[in-house]
Image (cartoon, rainbow, N blue to C red):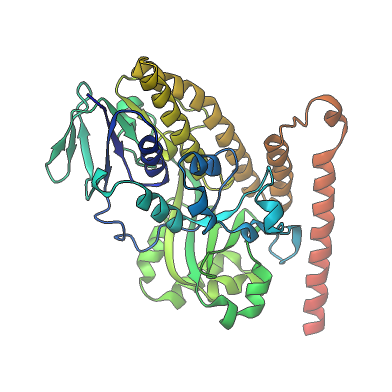
Amino acid sequence: MPLSVAIIGAGPSGLTLARLLQVTEIDVSITIFERDVSPTSRPSQGGTLDLHNDTGLAALKKAGLWDEALKHLRYDGEELKIGDKNATVLLHHREEPKSKAETGEYARPEIDRELLRSMLLQSVKPKIIQWGKVLQALEPNTGVLTFRDQSTAGPFDLVIGADGAWSKVRPLLTDIKPQYSGICGFTSFINNVNDEYPEMSKMIGRGSYFVYSDRKSFTAQRMGDESVRIAAWVMKDEKYASDVVAKYGKDEDALKQEILGNFADWSPDILRWTQASHGFVAWPLFELPVGQFWEHKKGYTMIGDAASLMTPFAGEGVNKAMKDALELAEALEVALKSDRDIDEAVKNYEQAMFPRATKYQQCTLRNKNALCTENSAVNVLVAFVDMVAEEMGYDLQKGWLAWVPVKTTMYYYASSRQTLGQSSKTLRSLFRR
């Protein structure tokens, strides 16, 4: 009898896992249960993602999807600007030539979330996905699933929660629930930015432009269709963004005024991002505690956001999710090919995943905490130094690096550029008078 596996959720982690299990030579029966009624029932799957060599890209290569992925990966999307409310660019990482970027150890090409999901969907057998299945209950001892439409499925040998922040599998493994991060925002799009707003398009560039000041943030990200996704982040009550969107409904002009009221003294060049946007969506951010884990339970496990939910301020969420899928698939493959205990393989996956997830969560929390400071643009760049050092395998507190004031140098460099930007803003305002 094949190993029967139920995957709850057809997002990047669930679909990556299904594809990886399909391409192995193991005897496994896979069923994905997805709450969406069809692949196109949600008009937008979100923004753009940067995939990393040892996580997201590694999973695509192992899944046999590298050639297909190259049709969609945007290496020019690696361009990154970090600035402050005066539109002073404190850091500008320019795009690498594609020939160099594709072979670079630290390459992080962009791909639209919607394109990634579509590619993964096309790579799995359509018959394994059951759409419109909202999980309501799990029978702990048998793995039988009950859905909102009163249908049931199972029993299954292994149920895998890949169902995101509000996972229905998680309560079976732990009492810990996601908590509001203290940050909420509004996402929107600018469609014909190249033709209608050429100066804005040039300002944003080919990749991402992140702006931080006063415990607030604006982000702009270039999408694969040349549109730009805008997000405005504020530290407000959990329901603030949702209440504002509900209050103004389709009156986008009034909605924009409400949003921009939070950024009164910011550069007009940045505020125009929201003024030119449409399609506003409220987005409160939730997170699970750093280092969260659960006691292993036979027949159940989790991957992705279901296992370790983070805010998006380190770009690790989907990469971590795809790495989870890669490691769990490899654990199951080794166990089945060597006639080892499947439950022990799942337990070993969890024990390896927990510290890896903790590392990503700590990095994300460090960036989030830097954002939540008055001098956030400078503090985010200092946190950025730690993130880059960790990715390259360096510990700034040990050896000769402990004697090199790398973070202090970054702090004073960014502060000096910020001061020059403020002076330029003051001079411009005087001349306008």
Q: Quadrant of residue 171?
A: top left
Left or right: residue 20 versus residue 371 is left
Q: Nearer the viewer, residue 269 or 360?
A: 360
Q: Residue furthest front?
A: 25
Q: Residue at 55% of width from left, 35% of height from top?
A: 361
Determine whether 427 is above or below 342 in the image: below
Q: Residue at 83% of width from left, 29% of height from top?
A: 402
Q: Nearer the viewer, residue 291 or 65?
A: 65
Left or right: residue 352 versus residue 22 is right
Q: Is residue 280 visible?
A: yes
Q: What is the x, y in percent for residue 318?
A: 49, 44
Q: What is the x, y in percent for residue 132?
A: 22, 50
Q: Residue furthest left?
A: 150
State the quadrant of the N terminus: top left
Q: What is the x, y in percent for residue 175?
A: 35, 27
State the quadrant of the C terminus: bottom right
Number of numbered callouts drawn: 0
Q: Nearer the viewer, residue 403 or 25?
A: 25
Q: What is the x, y in percent for residue 261?
A: 55, 68
Q: Residue at 47% of width from left, 30% of height from top?
A: 327
Q: Residue furthest bottom?
A: 433
Q: Residue at 18% of width from left, 28% of height from top?
A: 155
Left or right: residue 213 versus residue 247 is right
Determine whether 336 is above or below 415 in the image: above
Determine whether 115 is above or below 307 in the image: below
Left or right: residue 294 versus residue 399 is left
Q: Is residue 266 visible?
A: no
